Image (cartoon, rainbow, N blue to C red):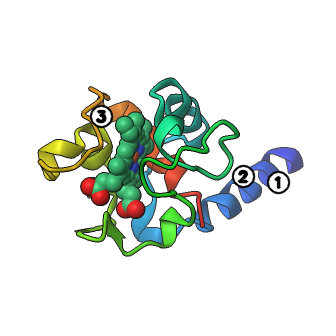
Amino acid sequence: MAVLFLAAALAGCAESEIPQGMRILDGDPETGARHIREYGCPACHTIPGIRSAKGIVGPPLNKFALRAYITGQYPNTPDNLVRWIMDAPAMAPQTPMPDMGIPEDEARHIAAYLYTLR
Ligand code: HEC
């Protein structure tokens, strides 16, 4: 019983470190980190916590949870971030970031990971 309570308390604590408006309730950051490697984001981005992610084609994604805007243009909300990850050119036709055909559930896990970065 005590152990269960402690686990719940710790989980609650980790959750509350992510700013409220940026929580992706059904996204799992660990699964997101796996998808980030699978989809090759590291080739273009430097991403803290992903060892292979040293790319410099796109901007570094450090402190992403603290950024006000995505690419300096779109408010950094969970909805916008998930849309961006799923199909960036649909939002910004001129962007060099490709549409990688990422399904929404996987994009939500990836967004959840990016919102752990602060
Ligand atoms: C072929 C290179 C490339 C790949 C692969 C790529 N990106 Fe990008 N990404 C870019 C570029 C270039 C930009 C800047 C786009 C712009 O300003 O229009 C960008 C922008 C972003 C941004 C906004 C950054 C900011 O500073 O606001 C995020 C978030 C992002 N990418 C996440 C991802 C994720 C997650 C993946 C993997 C699923 C990924 N990218 C794969 C090239 C790439």
Contact check, label 1 and label 3, Cβ < 8 Å:
no
Q: Tell me the residue at 50%/30% (across/down).
A: 35
Where residue 108 appears, x then y in whole percent?
39, 42
**Residue 104: assigned label:** 3
Residue in the picture at 60% in, 67% down: 118
User: Judging from the image, what secondary structure is the residue with disc 2 in?
Assistant: helix
Residue placed under numbered mark 1 in the picture: 6
Neighbours of disc 2 within 10 Å: few (<14), some (14-19), many (20+): few
Element under disc 3: helix
What type is the residue that disc 2 sits on? Ala
Query: In this image, 118 relative to 7: left or right?
Result: left
SS state under label 1? helix
Residue appearing at x 62%, y 67% in the figure: 17
From the viewer's perspective, tell me whether residue 95 is left or right of residue 62. Answer: left
Q: Which residue is mark 2?
A: 8
* Circles 1, 2 touching at the beta carbon (< 8 Å): yes
**Quadrant where the image shows the N terminus:** top right
Specify few, some or many for label 3: CA neighbours under 10 Å numbering under 14, 14-19, or 20 or more: some
Identify the residue at horizontal 61%, vertical 38% (top origin): 30
- Disc with the residue nearer the chain's start (1 vs 3): 1
Q: Is residue 100 visible?
A: yes
- Amino acid beneath label 3: Glu
Q: Nearer the viewer, mark 3 or mark 2?
A: 3
Q: Position of residue 81 (x, y in %)?
A: 32, 53
Is 64 above or below relative to 109? below
Q: Residue furthest right?
A: 2
Residue 32's place in the image compared with 77, above or below, is: above
Mark 1 packing: few (<14 Cα in 10 Å), some, or many (20+)? few
